Image (cartoon, coloured by chain):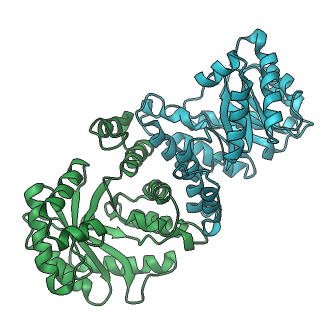
Chain colours: A green, B cyan
Amino acid sequence: MIIIGEKINGAIPSTGKAIKEKNAAFIRDLAIKQTEAGVDFIDVCASVDDDIELETMKWLIDIVQDATDLPIAVDSPNVHTCIESMKYCNKPGLFNSVSLEGDKIDVAFAAIADTKWECVALLNSDKGIPKTAKDRLDVFADLMAKVKEYKIDPARMHIDPLVEMLCTSEDGIAMVTEVIREIKSQYPTIHVTGAVSNISFNLPVRKMVNMGFTVLAMNAGMDSAILDPLNRDLMGIIFATEALLGEDEYCMEYIGAYREGIFGPVK
Amino acid sequence: MIIIGEKINGAIPSTGKAIKEKNAAFIRDLAIKQTEAGVDFIDVCASVDDDIELETMKWLIDIVQDATDLPIAVDSPNVHTCIESMKYCNKPGLFNSVSLEGDKIDVAFAAIADTKWECVALLNSDKGIPKTAKDRLDVFADLMAKVKEYKIDPARMHIDPLVEMLCTSEDGIAMVTEVIREIKSQYPTIHVTGAVSNISFNLPVRKMVNMGFTVLAMNAGMDSAILDPLNRDLMGIIFATEALLGEDEYCMEYIGAYREGIFGPVK
């Protein structure tokens, strides 16, 4: 499972406050703690006004790169911000994200095509978020046509099928798991990712829904996720699910992660 | 999900101690707490020496029936104990359990055929626990031949595919989920049950493995389980999974169970 640590995001109140106050120690601590939790990418999202977004991204990226060797996920709704932020990174990371809205994808793919950067792509378009599995897979087909056009290896793509809140769904997550299965069946080497916690908006005891969703999405083929790696229960159930799905012979990874203190009671 | 509350079992040290000391208040409390947690059956298993098993079952059943209106699961490795214990029950419950070992199934089915008792059946035989899905489904076929012979409605059966410890498995739970899917595909009205906690023997932070297993087994078709209903996290993820699987429109059951205090932080 590829884990994208989501903690350094200005939309999270405590992180937003640290960014506003230029509290470098707080950001550094989040980078170190997420590294210790075993993430694969450190997501960096400023979530500030446009006029200071780039300088904030540079400030954040510099702190993170000083604290950890992990690659960075440059995260902004503005692809130009992502492209500029790539330049601050000392190694290829994850471009987060593109979609078929407007000219985003051409701008982004032109910038990453000849690099080793990986890329998150959301399955929405100018028409919004498709309501059915078929429509979402149609967007996926359009997206993959662009991936092919820019000669990007599908293994560099992390497709986000768009996780929506469960509380307004009449049929649970059947549509999303269908989309995940179909994507993995068409492109076995592609990654399917998701912002796990979206599923539980407006519900009590959100961690139960987040954990259940993670297990079912992994079972369908999700192999990447944007989440809080300091949530020990979520990390624990991810390791448990890998073992249950036969991807961790004799539970060696599960036991190892427990011994490293990634989940289980705080010692 | 049909929940069989497992707490009144002499093999659990605290319950065994209460049985030994004839501590009726302790047993009564377990019956009430499990009822409040929303279980469907209260399992009663004496786990004492043969010569006092029946009198202990009667003592336990009398306490439980005085405390709750829920049906009882009469639980013993000895089918004769189960049959005698049925007589102490004031309403039909769950016969736990039969298997194809020896003449168990004929003895048990003769006793329950013309009643409204439901029945747990394990997929082992005189040859032990089958190692492959095919062999386990062969035992299932033999079992269902007996179910037909005794004219028992499959909807009264709870098939336990036998959950074994994950830590010695090379391919996770793929075999068990295959067996569950095939059973439900052959007999859509049949129940598939399991002793959830068996999966996590010898592993740290067992609840992670138990929760992950429960989600995946429910996804495969398990709709009944023998478990600790006072484990709030396990109950929470069961309600979450039902919603995720589309069996709880708009999460009304999930939210209701939370409001009733079945899971979530203790208030």
User: Residue A114 or B45: which is nearer the viewer?
Assistant: B45
Outermost residue on the right side: it is B114
Q: Nearer the viewer, residue A52 or B158?
A: A52
The reply, left or right, for residue B237 in relation to residue A197 is: right
Front residue of B130/B14: it is B14
**Quadrant, the C terminus of chain A:** top left
Where in the figure is residue B227, as x and y percent of width and height?
62, 38
Q: Is residue A193 left or right of residue A80?
A: right
Q: Residue at x 50, y 75 (%)?
A: A133
Q: How many marks?
A: 0
Q: Position of residue B135 (x, y in %)?
A: 61, 33
Above or below for A148 versus A24:
below
Residue at 70 percent of width and 34 percent of height: B29
Q: Position of residue B45 (x, y in %)?
A: 71, 25
Percent across and percent down for residue B247 are 64, 62
Asked whether residue B12 appears in the rendered view, the answer is no
